[in-house]
Amino acid sequence: NNDSTEDVTPVRWIRINPLRCYQGRDVNAVLEELGKKFPKRVENWNDIVPGSIYYDEYIPHLYGIHPQDKITSHELYKQGKIIIQDRASCFPAHILNPSKDDIIIDACAAPGNKTTHVASYMFGDAKQEDPHVQIYAFEKDPERAKILEKMIKVAGCSKNIQVTVGDFTKAATPDKFKDVTGFIVDPSCSGSGIFGRKYVDSLNRQRNNDTTDKDKKSTEEDDEVPDEQEDYNKKEDLKTRLAKLSSFQFQVIKHAMSFPTAKKIVYSTCSIHAEENERVVLDLLLDSKVKQWGWKVAAKESVIPTWPRRGKIEEFEEVFRDDPAKCQALADGCIRALPRDDGGIGFFAVCFER
Ligand code: SAM
């Protein structure tokens, strides 16, 4: 343990889950039950104080509290009415913005933060649990699939989501999912944007040769300092590891792109490395099949335009240096979040559409 505040998350993000509560009622009722009636706006993370609540200007129903304010023992949390989820991790479902008529596949789903968030967009206004399965969640790791099932149950969307334990690139085929309209692709990554306890866990798993697992479900005890982190970075051949990860990430997205009815794919990582982010986007744009299938990077207007930190333009300039407008559009189509500075984990998101 280390008391340094540098590695402690500046804010804990909680989202109110419309699937579990207050359909037809105001979100204020939940805030009232939390004892935090009047959300404030925050300019600077250092200004956040215990006991208050802060609204987020980007994601509906998302609020920030001071990390000292315990939430996991609260009944609202136990009942799935409140879900702890980093703000940046809420971006993909918000960007996908599915409606109740969509059919969505979450390719790499456990522990299910994004799957259940997607469900809240699709079914959040329903008077009661809608009986239709319209979200198909794939998870390769059987143990993590159990956590996913549990989270889906707690979040109140069991009837809407079907879980398949298996490799998305093999188990999900276009002939089985003839009506799919959109994808969440949030595959395993280096986890380099995660800090504190979660990052230590991911490093430990990587040491144990589990290269496919980094996203532990948030707990109140996440915020310990990874004192082994620096050591690890020196020892591991980062370049080799990033090359393996990015080739896997490319394959997963390309597989999603091969579904003829899909219109929108949101890709995300909690990595700070361009190799797993902008460069994966570039590799896809240069792929002949991807071109043939008609996939493009969605314009800034449809990917949280008011979020200021966008993709790294220099990565696109390396390939399209003769077309500055194209580079700008591609960088603007990507979203980045810096660990801590942007109020949570480091993150990357982009939306492909056609
Ligand atoms: N989207 C999740 C959330 O927000 O809660 C986090 C997903 S985590 C970054 C990546 C997950 O993908 C891991 O649980 C991992 O086991 C799973 N995974 C890795 N390769 C996979 C594959 N080929 N098919 C399905 N799942 C896979």
Image (tube, rainbow, N blue to C red):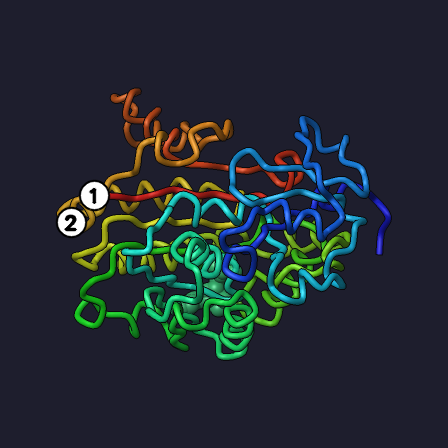
Mark nearer the N terminus (1 vs 2): 2
**In the displayed structure, does residue 270 sit left or right of residue 320?**
right
Image coords of residue 11 (percent x, y): 70, 43
* Residue that sits furthest to the left in the current view: 292
Q: Report if residue 245 is visible in the image.
A: no
Q: Residue at x 35, y 50 (%)?
A: 98
Image mark for residue 354: 1
Residues under numbered marks 1 and 2 in contact, where contact means CB atoms less than 8 Å apart: yes
49, 147: nearer the viewer: 49
Q: Residue at x 67, y 49 (%)?
A: 195
**In the displayed structure, does residue 308 sit left or right of residue 106?**
right
Image mark for residue 111: none
Tell me the kind of residue under disc 2.
Trp
Tell me the kind of residue under disc 1.
Arg
For residue 65, which quarter of the picture?
Answer: top right
Image coords of residue 218 (percent x, y): 65, 59
Residue 339 versus residue 70 in the image, above or below:
above
Q: Report if residue 167 is visible in the image.
A: yes
